[in-house]
Image (spheres, grey):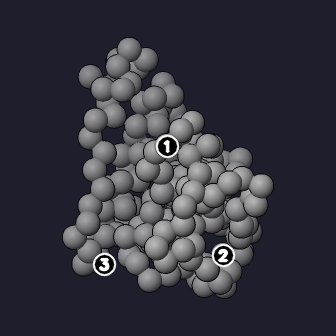
Amino acid sequence: MLPRPQLLRCDPSVPSAPASESGPQAVDPNDLYILMNELVAAIHALAGYPVPASLPSVQLAPLAQMQAIVCRGPCGVRGFYTPERGVFINESLDIKRNVVARSVLLHELVHYVQHVSGKFDGLHGDCYRWFMREREAYDIQNAYLRDNRESTRFHFESVPVMCRGEDDDETN
């Protein structure tokens, strides 16, 4: 098993969005550690990424905090990863019992292994590099859902248009 990640709770000074009907999900650090190892193994099996030497920190955060960091306003963010801060997951997701919620954590862990491996570092253009990372992460997430007999799929089709003008040579 990989070294244990740092499990952080959300910043209590940031106001929370209204809780889901069931409220924030409590996740035992040991359960999260086991789940993250299982998901990294799934990423390895589905996409061939080497298993990283360590796991990123994970922060279970309220929607409002996540929106303030990545959206600059209301949006439907479920999770994100940054090399500096690690993985953030919406605290209302039931990653223990719901395969779709777990797939969100898997998606963010894909971004972590992409970063650690440097697979997309050589691509020209920030937008194109971001697009390629997202496309692969969604492909792996959907393969995970398919392998777990879940019919939900996540789609990522319109982003190449967003890159036009910045990286025209890579997106055409």
Nearest to N terminus: mark 1 or mark 2: 2
Mark 2 residue element:
loop
Q: Which residue is mark 2?
A: 2
Question: From this viewpoint, is residue 117 visible?
Answer: no
Of the two numbered discs 3 and 2 in the rendering, the one whose residue sits closer to the viewer: 3
Residue at (38, 76) in percent of width and height: 99
Nearest to N terminus: mark 3 or mark 1: 1
Q: Residue furthest left?
A: 151
Q: Which residue is mark 1?
A: 74
Front position in the image: 122 or 38: 38
Identify residue type, mark 3: Asn
Asked which quadrant contains residue 89, the reply is bottom right
Residue at (62, 43) in percent of width and height: 69
As drawn, 86 above or below 31: above
Of the two numbered discs 3 and 1 in the rendering, the one whose residue sits closer to the viewer: 1
Q: Residue furthest right?
A: 13
As drawn, 18 above or below 98: above
Q: Which residue is mark 3?
A: 148
Compared across the picture, whether 1 is left or right of 155 comes to right
Identify residue type, mark 1: Pro
CB contact under 8 Å: marks 3 and 1: no
Of the 4 image quadrants, the one containing the N terminus is bottom right
Mark 3 residue element:
loop
Residue 149 image point, x, y percent: 24, 78
Residue 156 image point, x, y percent: 31, 45
Front position in the image: 24 or 84: 24
